[in-house]
Image (tube, rainbow, N blue to C red):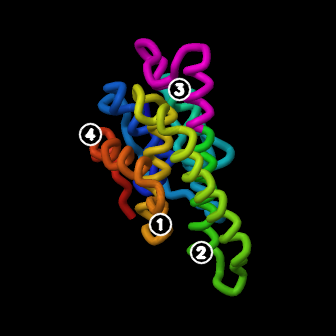
């Protein structure tokens, strides 16, 4: 399998963590692929019309995207583990993944607004709106999701760990740990997992 990736992408990281947790990382060839909202990568577009990463090419040439689909595909190889099969546990894991992915998406929009958009066109209120989404999501992780986070590892806890790691990477001054000691303690434990250490983002 081939994975179009960028080392700084939190969505790519989520897929790579899943691959390592499932022992599949050696079956995936990483293909560097720069991608941005204003400069799509033609090599990726040939397989994924959005041009977004991660995009996974299977051995038969089939393309899978986005990170949620790729992660579930990898988890289904030799039997699902990180995606609960059914019932309340499944919906909990999927909802937690969605919360984390939306938080990640808001953080990426902040990044695009403050780095990619020309300074004279930047919209401060837009950035603050995305920041508010990030912080309210972090608050809900602390207030509602700690039991799910501290239980058996799932796609939800992986997505949350990658989202918080992205905040540390791109927005170290955002202060997500302030007043959230339990969440911070969970993250410090989760962040030292070999799969997280091996996939730490780089610029």
**Res. 78 in view:** yes
Q: Say left or right for 73 vs 7.
A: right
Q: Which mark is residue 72?
A: 3
Q: Which of these two is toward me, 165 or 72?
A: 165
Q: Quadrant of the N terminus?
A: top left
Instruction: Give the residue at mark 1.
Output: 175
| Mark 2, other Cα within 10 Å: few <14 / some 14–19 / many ≥20 | some
| 81 in the magenta segment | yes
**Res. 167 in view:** no
> Which of disc 2 and disc 1 is earlier in sequence?
2
| Mark 3, other Cα within 10 Å: few <14 / some 14–19 / many ≥20 | some
Does the residue at mark 2 contact the one at mark 4 (Cβ under 8 Å)?
no
Q: Quick check: 165 above or below 64?
A: below
Residue 79 at x, y percent in the picture: 44, 13
> Which of disc 4 and disc 2 is earlier in sequence?
2
Instruction: Give the residue at mark 2.
Output: 114
Mark 2 to mark 3: distance in Å?
32 Å
| Mark 4, other Cα within 10 Å: few <14 / some 14–19 / many ≥20 | few
Q: Quick check: 8 above or below 197?
A: below
Give the image quarter of residue 136: bottom right
Q: Secondary structure under badge 2?
A: helix
Does the residue at mark 1 contact the one at mark 2 (Cβ under 8 Å)?
no
**Image: magenta residue range:** 73-97
Q: Secondary structure under badge 3?
A: helix
> Which of disc 3 and disc 2 is earlier in sequence?
3
| 74 in the magenta segment | yes
Mark 2 to mark 4: distance in Å?
32 Å
Residue 38 at x, y percent in the picture: 65, 65
User: Residue sitting at 48 percent across and 39 percent down?
Assistant: 146
């Amino acid at each position: 399998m081939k994975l179009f990736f960028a080392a700084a992408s939190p969505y790519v990281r989520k897929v790579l963590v899943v691959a390592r947790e499932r022992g599949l990382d050696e079956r995936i060839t990483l293909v560097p692929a720069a991608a941005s909202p204003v400069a799509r990568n033609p090599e990726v577009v040939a397989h994924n019309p959005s041009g977004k990463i991660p995009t996974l090419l299977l051995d038969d040439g089939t393309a899978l995207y986005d990170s949620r689909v790729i992660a579930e595909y990898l988890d289904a190889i030799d039997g699902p583990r990180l995606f609960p099969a059914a019932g309340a546990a499944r919906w909990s894991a999927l909802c937690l993944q969605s919360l984390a992915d939306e938080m990640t998406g808001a953080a990426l929009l902040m990044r695009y607004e403050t780095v990619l958009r020309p300074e004279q066109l930047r919209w401060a209120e837009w950035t603050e709106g995305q920041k508010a989404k990030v912080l309210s999501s972090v608050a809900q992780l602390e207030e509602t999701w700690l039991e799910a986070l501290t239980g058996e590892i799932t796609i939800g806890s992986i997505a949350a760990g990658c989202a918080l790691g992205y905040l540390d990477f791109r927005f170290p001054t955002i202060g997500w740990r302030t007043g959230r000691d339990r969440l911070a303690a969970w993250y410090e434990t989760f962040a030292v997992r070999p799969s997280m250490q091996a996939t730490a983002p780089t610029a």
